[in-house]
Each structure stands twice: as structure tokens, then as C-alpha cells.
Image (spheres, rainbow, N blue to C red):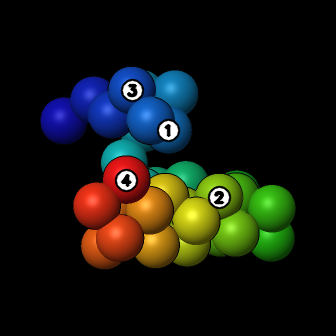
Amino acid sequence: MDNAAFDGVSALHLMLNGELADIIRVRRYLEAECAGG
């Protein structure tokens, strides 16, 4: 499944294969989703 929010990769793939900044990016995305943003 492509994900436009993470340049076409899954959030899990990004967190497992990325850097700390990528994990922070996913966290901010999830926080915004939970807040309705």
C-alpha cells in the first residue's frame, strides 16, 4: 500500500529503515490524525 504522507512507503517501513527524524515524522503524523488534523 502506497502512502503519500510518507513518500510512498508504509509508516512501519519508514520507522524500521529510516533515521530518528523519520520516526519523529511518523509520530507527528499520528498525533495530527488523532487530533483530527
Task: Return the residue nearer the eye: 30 or 11.
Answer: 30
Q: Is residue 8 above or below residue 24?
A: above
Counting residues from the N terminus, which is met first, the one under dot 4 or under dot 3?
3
Say which label, 2 or 1, has the lower sequence index.
1
Proximity of marks 2 and 1: CB atoms separated by less than 8 Å: yes
- Name the amino acid, label 2: Arg
- Which amino acid does the dot numbered 1 rest on? Phe
Nearest to the observer: residue 26 or residue 13? 26
Give me the disc on residue 25.
Answer: 2
Q: Give how far apart the Cα atoms at labels 1 and 4 are.
A: 16 Å
Residue underneath mark 1: 6
Considering every residue shown, the one lying at the far front of the view is 36
Q: Position of residue 24 (x, y in %)?
A: 70, 69
Look at the image and tell me whether residue 16 can be seen: no
Q: Would you identify the image quadrant in which residue 18 lies?
A: bottom right
Q: For the N terminus, which image quadrant?
A: top left
N-term-proximal mark, 3 vs 2: 3
Q: Are marks 3 and 1 in contact (CB under 8 Å)?
A: yes
Instruction: Give how far across and how far down residue 3 sits, in percent.
Output: 33, 34
Report the Cα–Cα distance between label 2 and label 4: 15 Å
User: Which disc is residue 37 wearing?
Assistant: 4
Residue tagged 3: 4
Give the left or right position of residue 32, taking residue 15 as reference: left
In the image, what residue occupies the spot 28% across and 61% down? Answer: 36
- Say whether residue 37 is visible: yes
Foreground mark, 4 or 3, reads 4
